[in-house]
Amino acid sequence: MKPTIPRFWQTAVLVLVVVGLLLLSLSGFMGSLFKAAQSPLVAAQRWISTRYLAVYEFITAPRDMASIRQENAELKNQVALLQTQIIELQQQLSEASVLYALLDFARSQPENTYVAATVIGRDPNPFLKYILIDQGSDAGLRNGMPVVTAQGLVGRVDAVTAQAARVQLITDPASVVNVRLQSIEQEAQLAGSLTGELSLDMVPQDANVTPGTLIVTSGLGGTYPSNILVGQVLSVRKLENDLFQTALVQSAVDFNNIQAVLVITNFRPVEIAPLIPTPAP
Amino acid sequence: MAILAGIPILGIILMLQLGIISQLPLLQGTADLILLVLVAWALQDQVTSAWEWGILGGVMVSLVTATPFYVVIFSYLLVILIARMARRRIWQMPLLVMLILTFLGTLVFHLVSIVVFQIMGSNLPLRESLTLVTLPSALLNLLLAFPVYTIVADLAKWLYPTELEV
């Protein structure tokens, strides 16, 4: 049977339709049509993909979860290990900074011989201001040796064993240090107290003591070497009827946070008790 | 056995006292673990070594403190004496007795210390000493009294196991 439309015309119409569709598409007139056609396809594709992934995860999850959990535990262990190392390094850095400061101080005063010691405890009696250090007679420590830090005077060795020593702080209520007010060259006495405050006594009324005046050891009495920084005057109390004026002193050392100290081992206190005259019977 | 066990136990407690407790003041006061342990130990019914522990504790503390040894030993033994007497009379309420004796023990130890230090020439005003040192110390001791009593009671059961009648 002979076709009603010749083949040439069929092909020509087909080509024209294709070219027309292409031209329409390129000119943007087919966008809405494509969108309308795409949306159900994309929705269907999404549904299939989602279901596929769900099934895939369901099948593979147990193996992956186990490996993830194992990896998680390993990472947690590593984090804990690193945190421990960080804490250790921070502690070492803190100790090193204290020791560097002490070393600088020791180098700046080459005339003295020092033994460095770590503070290992405090006196259990709260009325007393004493610390325990981890160096004793084996390291050359003796009774009465002065104890300092890079900031200033701490106290003196009160008792010694082979491996440890007890140090009386200058803030102890029984402690008295002979000092000199540096700017006015005035001798005085520095006394500790129950609260740990330092007070300056035996300052003559005519002495011009002002807040901020630096206080150093005078060396009188032979208990401490001279010219060790003790602190500075915080406030002055001057009453007309008193024989002496007194002052509150800000210590150069933070006694609540002493970690390490230096003991001056080439200084021996002078025993002056036999030189003090006793009343005749 | 219990007396010998007191040496390492009191030694460890003393190290804790020197290294930690004494560095944690409230105002100027600090807790006294040795005193608490001795009081709690003396309050245990089955314990027969309270006096020996008192002497051991006193000697150990005397080795490290600048307090005269007789002050420490006398105070501890006095507190143990009060504790043993109280245990016989008020045995029904050991925790209450522990609290009362903790306060009394702190007071005794501090008053003896103040008197002796003042005789020795220290600058210790009584009022400031009581308000800044003794009362805060007593408060800290009271806070630690319950846990210390519980631990010491367990220790006493371990060192003095009760005999079972068959």
Image (cartoon, rainbow, N blue to C red):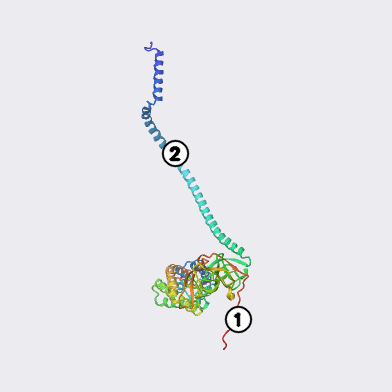
Tell me the residue at 57%/61% (across/down): A101
How many numbered circles does the render carry? 2
Q: Which residue is mark 1?
A: A275
Give how far across and how far down residue B76 sits, in percent.
Answer: 48, 76
Instruction: Locate the C terminus of chain A and report the quarter of the image it occupies.
Output: bottom right
Rendered residue at 39%/14% (across/down)? A9
Q: Earlier in the sequence, mark 2 or mark 1?
A: 2
| Residue A11: quadrant of the picture | top left
Q: Chain ID for label 2? A: A
The crowding category of the residue bearing disc 2, from other C-alpha atoms within 10 Å (few below 14, some 14 to 19, many at least 20), is few
Left or right, A205 with respect to A37, comes to: right
Q: Is residue A275 left or right of residue A78?
A: right
- The amino acid at mark 1 is Leu
A254 or A120, which is in the foreground? A254
The answer, for residue A148, to whether it is visible in the render is yes
**Res B165 visible:** no
The reply to whether discs 2 and 1 touch (Cβ–Cβ < 8 Å) is: no
The residue type indicated by label 2 comes to: Tyr
Q: Secondary structure at mark 2?
A: helix
Return the residue at label 2.
Answer: A56
Residue A136 or residue A273, whichever sits in front: A273
Q: Image height check: is A261 above or below A55? A: below
